[in-house]
Amino acid sequence: MFEAETEAFWQSTSHRVLVATVAELHRQRRLLQEQIGFHRVNGARTIISDLFIAGAGIEVGGGDRPFPVKEGVSVTYGDIRNSFELRRHFGNDEAVVCGAINAESFEGIGHESVDFIISAHVIEHLANPLGSILEGLKRIKTGGVYVIAIPDMRHTFDRYRAPTTYDHLVEDLRSGGEPSLIDAYRDHVKLVHPIYGAPIADEQQENEAQMLLAARMDTHVHCWTRETFNDHVAKVIEGLAEIALETALENEILVVLRKVNLPLV
């Protein structure tokens, strides 16, 4: 046993030092847990990549943590942000981007032109998630895959929100999602913001939500549990693709869709 692991070592230590020491120990434990979680998730991603990703494709919103791919795989990294905006957003120079790609519309990407699409922690930020899935499938060759990773809301700051319903997503598909964006910002103000700061007074919440919408603050527009996401995906891809794999680890849900057939309309 090390001396610092005995009670006697700490008995003469001041309360102030003890408080600071405990706080630092908790910080180090959190960082260690995050590192362990990252390596577990990245390990699962690597296995999925080795099994399903081959040829040439695209990853949208890869940021500074692109999905792992094996040697010989060709990936075009796309984002709605340019290199400068990505550096500012992530606070480093590690974000990868080859050009602009809209993760909802995939405008400019030819139909049946890629072997795979990777979208990791992107769909929850989109106004029209079902549109992203359907438009992405149009760009993938038959037999190709669409790999989607999202957070399980129960393990994130979304934990107090109600899961997005399928009816809501269908309406977003019809409208493009813009009309319902304000609801996400209302949720953020009422249910997410208090996790990190002082609650916003009820009478001020609507004004705050409207200001966040006007600024288009980056937030989770939609949120799912593992069960609700798999149910929604299965419904929207019926007859077009199949769920080739579904799993979850730490706070991440991973789904691999394999394209079966999709009329190019």
Image (cartoon, rainbow, N blue to C red):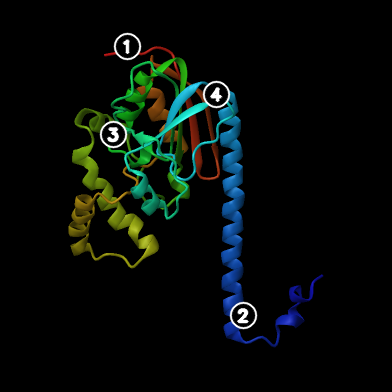
**Labels 3 & 2 near each other (Cβ < 8 A):** no
Q: Position of residue 160 (x, y in %)?
A: 38, 52
Give the amino acid type for the residue marked by disc 1 in the picture.
Pro
Element type at mark 1: loop
Give the amino acid type for the residue marked by disc 3 in the picture.
Asn
CA gap between label 4 and label 1 equals: 23 Å
Q: Position of residue 42 (x, y in %)?
A: 57, 40
Q: Position of residue 242 (x, y in %)?
A: 46, 19
CA gap between label 3 and label 1 equals: 20 Å
76 relative to 85 in the view: left or right = right
For the residue carrying disc 3, how many other residues have a C-alpha within 10 Å: few (<14), some (14-19), or many (20+)?
Answer: many
Point out the image quarter for the N terminus. Answer: bottom right
- Please state the total of marks drawn on the protein image: 4
| Residue located beneath label 1 in the image | 263
Give the amino acid type for the residue marked by disc 2 in the picture.
Leu
For the residue carrying disc 2, how many other residues have a C-alpha within 10 Å: few (<14), some (14-19), or many (20+)?
Answer: few
Give the amino acid type for the residue marked by disc 4 in the picture.
Phe
Element type at mark 2: helix
Q: Image height check: is 105 above or below 26?
A: above
Q: Image height check: is 234 above or below 225?
A: above
Element type at mark 4: helix
Along the polypeptide, which appears first: circle 3 or circle 1? 3
Along the polypeptide, which appears first: circle 1 or circle 2? 2
- Which label is found at residue 18? 2
| Residue located beneath label 4 in the image | 52
CA gap between label 3 and label 2 equals: 50 Å
Whether residue 117 can be seen here: no
